[in-house]
Image: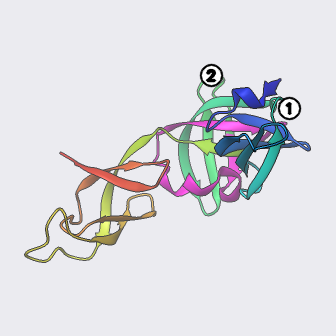
Amino acid sequence: MISTADFRNGTRLEIDGDPYYIVEFQHVKPGKGGAVVRTKLKNYRTGSVVDRTFRSGERFAEPDLEERDMQFLYASGESYTFMDTETYEQFAYDKNQLGENADLLKEDMTAKILVYHHKPIAVELPIFVELKVVDADPGIRGDTASGGTKPAKVETGATIKVPLYLEIGEVIKIDTRTREYVERVR
């Protein structure tokens, strides 16, 4: 059981039969009455974010989530095929089952698949991935590192905002939590 005292960003809990994780939380002690905890929770299944307030000391069940290390093999249309690194079984998942970061998956990449009641609900990528830029507007003389950004398409098909000086063929590091450019890889 998880108490409101155990709340941290990323803590997983089950509410009304659905798995959620805490996006942000705040302990509040009003002038009168008991303390409360205000939270923003994201539903793993639907992706919706809800605001909920709980009394201090409330307890919640932990969701029955299983993390499996799987190697991404290939994508075919909306179907993504993974191989369990322990049993070597292959599984195909729909893109919508894998969440918003499915387009950052690169072949042979190892990812954690969150399984809830024998169904995949999310993919957790490594914090940083290195991908090659395959399409971007050309850099213009005078563009600086402190300047603006432009959209660039990486080898997996995702579009990321990058600095103006980056060109096609360069490898960049992307933070999968925020989907933002971090640095150029040499």
Q: Position of residue 179 (x, y in %)?
A: 45, 55
* Amino acid of disc 1: Glu
**Residue at position x 31%, y 72% in the image:** 150
State which tag comes first along the sequence, 2 or 1: 1
Q: Where is mark 2, residue-wise? A: 86
Q: Position of residue 53 (x, y in %)?
A: 80, 47
Residue 116 appears in the rendering: no
Mark 2 falls on what kind of element?
A: loop
Q: Where is mark 1, residue-wise? A: 58
**Magenta-span inclusion, residue 179:** no
In the figure, 183 relative to 149: above or below? above
Assess disc 2: are there few (<14), some (14-19) or many (≥20) residues with their C-alpha within 10 Å of its C-alpha.
few
In the figure, 132 relative to 10: above or below? below
Locate the C terminus by quadrant.
top left
Q: What range is drawn magenta here?
A: 91-119
Mark 1 falls on what kind of element?
A: loop
Q: Which mark is residue 79?
A: none
